Image (cartoon, coloured by chain):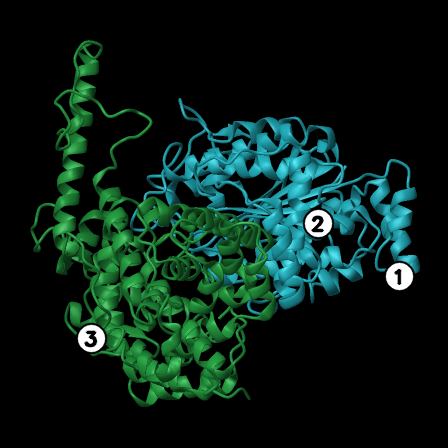
Chain colours: A cyan, B green
Amino acid sequence: MAADDDCERMTPSRRAVLGAASALFAWSYMPKFAHAAAGSRDSRFLLVVLRGALDGLSAVPPLGDLGYADLREGIALAKDGPEAALPLDGFFYLHPAMPNLARLYASGQAAIVHASATGYRERSHFDGQDVLESGQGGPGKTDSGWLNRLIASLPPGEAVSRHGALGVGVVPPLVVRGEAPVLGWAPPRMARAGADLVQRLGDLYGERDPGLALVLKRAIETELIASRQGAEQPRGGGGPDSAEGMKRIAEGAARLVGAEDGPRIAALAFEGWDTHANEGGAKGRLATLLGGLDGALATFESGLKPVWKDTVVMVVTEFGRTARVNGTVGTDHGTGTVAFLVGGAVKGKRMIVDWPGLKPEQLHEQRDLRPTTDIRAVAKGVVADLFGLSGPVLAEKVFPGSGDLKPMQGLVV
Amino acid sequence: MADRSEPSQKALALQRFGLGLKPGQAAGVADVRERLLADIRSEGAPQPSVSFSGAAPIGRALYAFEDEERAARESRRVAGQLGVGQGVQVAAAPPAPGQPQGQMAAPAQPVPQFPQTIYREEVVARIQSALDAETGFAERLVQFWSNHFCVSVAKGNFVRAMAGAFEREAIRPNIFGRFEDLLIAVESHPAMLNFLDNQLSIGPDSRAGKRRGRGLNENLAREIMELHTLGVSGGYTQADVTSLARIITGWTVVGRDARLGFPGSFAFNPGLHDPGGQKLLGKVYRQEGKEKGMAALADLARHPSTAAFIARKLARHFVADEPPQALVADLARTFRETGGDLAALSRALVTSELAGTAPATKLRTPQEFLVAAFRALGRRPDFGQIAGPLGVMGQPLWQPSGPDGYPDTNAAWATPEGIKTRIDVAAQLGRQAAGSVADPRALVEEVLGPLASPQTRQAVARAESKPQAIALLLMSPEFQRR
């Protein structure tokens, strides 16, 4: 992978030190060392899953590729005009609905991975999301997510494992489910029950139902943190497929992850990206969703301000969409797409890409953007740098069977 | 293995296959199996009572609503261009009955638009059916199949207005018929054709395809095989998806022009259909027009992968996240040997020793929980009392986040936030019902009976208030799991 090789040469010092040390001792983690290291940080990592398969060619259009406009009749973006796409590196542009991401990119706080995918090559949303979140080589292999196993692989005393992972939503994303404790939170929409009732149920579950006792205990822990950070009044509002809903979810997640005793890792999901019909160009359905995502990124930035320099927000989706627009001015399920890395800890202002091209013979199965970067290598690189996990642990526990995929280096400053 | 004749096992069977006991029912646990089997009727599940009969009249009303909306927008635009918008009031819609001419609805509480009005009525009627049902076995199957073949009102006004009709027309009449008939009814219903975009799909070699340069949309075809019949590992390829998409081109919804029939109803449009033979799963289909799709669906319905997929999903829904393999095998065999006879399948499920005696591990879904609570408390909820709790618990009616429907495992529902939200709902229900429940301790005996543990009885008896006692009952492990 060309991008990976390039990165290999720009090895930042801290990363190199950690890598060497873990190889030397073959420990599964380097907690004390990481703490002792000068400038060691209390990292935050937020994973945003875009459910439905984001059209990477519309989010980050390769306007420098001569094949683009032809494939995208009816939804193509342009370099010029009143709704011009936002320039990134001269070849790639950003959808005009994402001015905040453009600003973060320009200020070195965002990097964009293009032509990327997991190892999954079929086109089922549900299997695709299963692979993306379970971190396995294929679907249906496990009920635990890779972020949960990451936490389970860290020593018990670490800030990260002590506080667990936050799964946002009444149904938390698979990526955080598993053995390690998961804290749950969703934007409140109904008056909360009294503490006495909760206590009595805790007692009843303790005697009769260990499973419910455990989840209730975790719920109480999260609420404690949330209440210290300023209790939120219930209100209505849009769901995770609306700009307003995305902003509220981002606000809540930032409040919890930014807390001193809050979780260091969070996963959340935004929905509605399955744009089979009337996808729209600079305006329209996808533009509205991208605007919502852009607003959520700005909300993370402001909500996490004190720890933003130690934060990476990673935005991923299960796969991309067809390179050519379909019969209904939308796009069908495809393969390669984009991922975003945003945050003060990101070594930004760059496209991470080995561009495969858009000519018919360059497309995957002559229909989809060919993936040239495995998203697992990116994720491994980010969490290795943030949390000091070694290659073997990443390859065996977090992303099982990914030994051939080296963690991408130099993603974190 | 537990003894099915035990009172607690009988009560559990009613919870597992039904919707929860109403006061006065616990005494009659004697002939549980017969009471459940009584729901299996050739005409399907009972029909809820609503004012619009089906897709066609709803479609016509929906088109009329959209035309009015457009006209109103246009007149506002014209008024704005003339610069007289300030002084001229343009009526957005005819005033509602009883509303004086010229009086605008308060902005905070807009009058629900037509699709939302229909949706509200359908939601209330659907829940009322569940509350009226004796054991609720047929209603549970309606919920199961409606989730298996889900549509989502988040798609837009069309599905919002049609979701209830879809369940009433495609699901309810067919849950005890042949799977093939259920499948065809579902895939040809306007709500499904709109939800998964097939009404827009155009055969590349059809008359319209050649003229307009538009083409396929493979959304419905993929989900038919992945989610509705074979299952994702059922043995099909991308080429099969494309073939099936071509086969069902022309399966569409009649537009407001009524050219192909009654507006809003299903039509086969030969002008959109890809002519010629198509190879699907190794077999070539050469039938004319709609028959090609009918034949392909019939074959998919009878495919062994479909039998295995449905059997496993059914067992997982009713019995356990990881159901006994032997039960899945039994159900799959019944499906295959009867050619997908859903009455036989339902009978096999209820009478199975394995299904009846498995321990109660499954958490009720939010919809099941809310319906069971309403039944236990004898309530007749309005729309807000249904939609509010279901919304916060993450399972509003006909609104899953994707075409795979709502999740069906404890991992999805037995979560910290999920349980905490349920407690909030239970607390609210307790406050609302406190006036009508004479004695919560007696209610425990009525709705849980032999299932109630000493600890739950004690917790309810020692509650600090009647609302809290009711909430404790509703959140007890015995009420939550089935």
How far is the residue under mark 1 from the one under mark 3?
63 Å
Q: Is residue B242 left or right of residue A175?
A: left
Q: Cα distance, mark 2 to mark 3?
A: 50 Å
Q: Which mark is residue A26?
A: 1
Q: Residue, x 67% and y 32% (percent of image)?
A: A304
Question: Which residue in the protein does label 3 denote?
Answer: B286
Q: Secondary structure at mark 2?
A: helix
Q: Earlier in the sequence, mark 1 or mark 2?
A: 2
Count of all numbered marks drawn on residues in the image:
3
Q: CA distance from mark 1 to mark 2?
A: 23 Å
The chain under label 2 reads: A
On-image quarter of the N terminus of chain B: bottom right
Q: Which disc is residue A4 wearing? A: 2
Give the image quarter of residue A217.
Answer: bottom right
Label 1 crowd bin: few (<14), some (14–19), many (20+), radius 10 Å = some
For mark 1, name the chain. A
Q: Amino acid at mark 1?
A: Ala
Amino acid at dot 3? Arg
- x and y percent of residue B74 in the render? 17, 25
Check the image and name the residue furthest to the front: B438
Residues tagged by mark 2 and mark 3 found on one chain of the structure: no
Q: Position of residue A157 (x, y in %)?
A: 84, 52
Displayed quadrant of residue B176:
bottom left
Return the residue nearer the eye: B136 or A383.
B136
Residue B124: image location, x then y, percent: 28, 52
Tags 1 and 3 touching, CB below 8 Å? no
* Residue A87, placed above or below residue B319: above
